[in-house]
Amino acid sequence: MTQPDDGFSVLPIRGIPEVRPGDDVAALIMQAAPWLRDNDVLVVTSKIVSKAEGALVPVPTQGPDREAAREQALQSQTARVVATRGHTRIVQTHHGFVMASAGIDASNVERSQLVLLPKDPDASARSLRSDFLERGLDVAVVISDTMGRPWRNGLTDVALGSAGIEPLRDHRGETDPHGNELHITQMAVVDELAAAAELVKGKIDQVPVAVIRGYLTATAPDSAPVVPTLVRDAANDLFSLGTAEAIELGRAL
């Protein structure tokens, strides 16, 4: 992957209709954006991928039964609870992501449904990229979703899965302009592109896909997946303990 010398552009794709289970997402995107080119990076909101894949849970539209159904969905998507405060629950999903409510979403969907994260976002990205290749278009795909961040207010979009682009740009072993060798610098490229794309997608504008044009000069057919490339394992995570786990460990010391 070679970065351009003159920057890149971030373009929204407008006019994508409501996505329903079984829909051909690649076809819907290409119909809305016949101007796509080889080496574009398509940043696709995970929600439309989940809808197309049928990752939906039926729930009552109101009352305590709705909350009970939502709780059941949350438990099914939770590998472990990391922290709880009030109604907010931070959990680790079965993918390994740490996020509020396991990424379950009730926005931009009929009130009788909840949207889960794609079961395997990397596989979803590879499948979508393959669908474009079958139509003669060689693009990279990033599946994105919104996450909060420890120590900082505000949300940002990050990559849940990708294909055709390396998730990390590794600078280790390179030398900076002052002659210092870099030892730990690895840039989470797909997270940075996901965040940039969100600026033109927005949350209420019904623009679920954005195009990063000019960043890639060639796709990476054998690119690494986001999981586990960007999901840090417990052995290397200095903050892996949840609230209850940290308290229990402190009592034992």
Image (cartoon, rainbow, N blue to C red):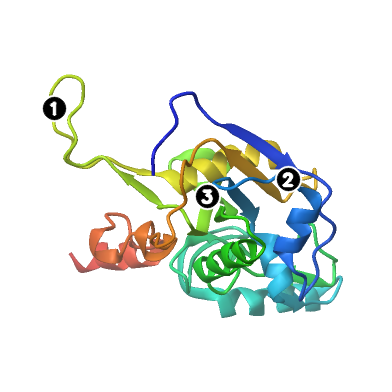
Image coordinates for residue 129, horizontal then vertical, percent:
58, 62
Q: Which residue is the site of mark 3?
A: 158
Marks 1 & 3, CB-CB < 8 Å contact: no
Relative image position of residue 71 (x, y in whole percent): 66, 75
At x 79% / y 77%, what residue is drawn?
A: 59
- Return the residue found at the far top: 178
Give residue 22's position: percent from left, percent from top.
76, 76
* 193 lies above or below 9: below
Identified by mark 1, the residue type is: Asn
Could you tell me which secondary element the residue under label 1 belongs to?
Answer: loop
Does any portion of residue 216 appear in the rendered image?
yes
Decide: is 19 above or below 175. Answer: below
Mark before the other along the chain sequence, 2 or 1: 1
Q: Kindly indicate whether the residue at mark 2 contacts the one at mark 3 (C-beta within 8 angstroms).
A: no
The numbered disc on residue 180 is 1
Q: Nearer the viewer, residue 53 or 148?
A: 53
At which x and y percent is residue 50? 67, 68
> Marks 2 and 1, how far apart in space?
42 Å
